[in-house]
Image (cartoon, helix red, strand yellow):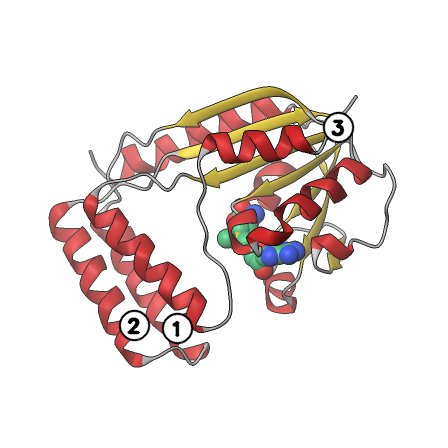
């Protein structure tokens, strides 16, 4: 397994997800700007990007309308879109507000998709996840991974019928060159955020171990629902 396998696996997974979402020509609210915004636009969706962090909105290189807000305070409480997507965003939201965020999605679109990292993974990934959680907590943020059944229950509780619920398991290990880039970027970001120096050192050690021993991302959980 090498860099090419890793890249093609990521492309294949996105292709599968976009085919499940059927976004071509649809209006999509993308909660949390990033890779998802780019992929949705490439797939022919009319995207509106939403993010609570101004820096994220400034970094957005995709030419789409952007809204700066916490999704629970989204300013249009009516059906203005076909789909609301949370791709790797809900775990950054206070778990006490997960229901509220999903309820808001039910007001703005008849379809919802939640894509989240699973809490499962190998021992090295568990070390990485635990440290990420500690770092985020130390700056008053959240990094809370939940199981597939947690997301399914939550989506059902807010009145959606589940049309897809699945786990996509990674086949390839993260290539050392990607881990090296991650190491540099993470150390830089942690410095900017004023995080304790020890955390940067711990992260460096974990990513060095990952380069030597091999680490996979956790499985990706996908839940898609429709509101009658
Ligand atoms: C890990 S990133 C994922 C972004 C993107 N969906 C992607 O595929 O790369 C999570 C994003 O969600 C944003 N976010 C976190 N909590 C939010 C909230 N309550 N409302 C809106 N955006 C939020 C963060 O600022 C961050 O940009």
Residue 151 point in image, percent of width and height = 54, 35
Q: In percent of the image, x 29 and y 52: which residue is there? A: 178
**What is the quadrant of the C terminus in the image?**
top right
Disc 3 C-beta below 8 A from ligand 1? no
Q: Is residue 61 visible?
A: no
| SS class, disc 3 | loop
Viewer-side residue, 129 vs 4: 129
Q: Position of residue 97 (x, y in %)?
A: 64, 52
Q: Which quarter of the figure has residue 220?
A: top left
Tell me the residue at 17%/52% (across/down): 211
- Asked whether disc 1 touches disc 2, contact meaning CB atoms under 8 Å apart, the reply is yes
Which tag is nearer the camera, tag 2 or tag 3? Answer: 2
Secondary structure, mark 1, is helix
Read off the residue under disc 1.
190
Q: CA distance from mark 1 to mark 2?
A: 8 Å
What residue does disc 3 label?
A: 25
Mark linked to residue 228: none
Q: Which mark is residue 199?
A: 2
Q: Residues within 10 Å of mark 1 (few under 14, many from 20)?
A: some
């Amino acid at each position: 397994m090498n860099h090419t396998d890793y890249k093609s696996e990521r492309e294949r997974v996105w292709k599968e997800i976009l085919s499940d979402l059927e976004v071509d020509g649809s209006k999509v609210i993308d909660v949390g700007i990033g890779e998802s915004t780019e992929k949705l636009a490439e797939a022919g969706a009319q995207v509106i990007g939403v993010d609570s962090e101004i820096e994220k909105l400034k970094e957005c290189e995709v030419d789409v309308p952007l809204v700066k807000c916490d999704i629970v305070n989204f300013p249009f409480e009516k059906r203005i879109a076909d789909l609301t997507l949370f791709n790797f965003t809900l775990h950054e939201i206070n778990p006490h507000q997960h229901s509220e965020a999903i309820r808001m999605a039910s007001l703005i679109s008849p379809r919802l998709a939640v894509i989240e990292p699973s809490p499962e993974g190998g021992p090295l990934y568990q070390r990485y996840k635990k440290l990420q959680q500690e770092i985020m907590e130390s700056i008053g943020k959240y990094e809370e991974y939940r199981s597939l059944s947690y997301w399914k229950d939550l989506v059902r509780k807010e009145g959606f019928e589940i049309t897809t619920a699945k786990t996509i398991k990674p086949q390839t290990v993260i290539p050392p060159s990607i881990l090296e880039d991650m190491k540099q970027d993470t150390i830089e970001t942690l410095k900017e955020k004023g995080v304790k120096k020890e955390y940067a050192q711990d992260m460096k050690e974990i990513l060095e171990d990952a380069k030597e021993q091999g680490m996979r991302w956790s499985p990706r959980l996908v839940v898609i629902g429709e509101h009658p």
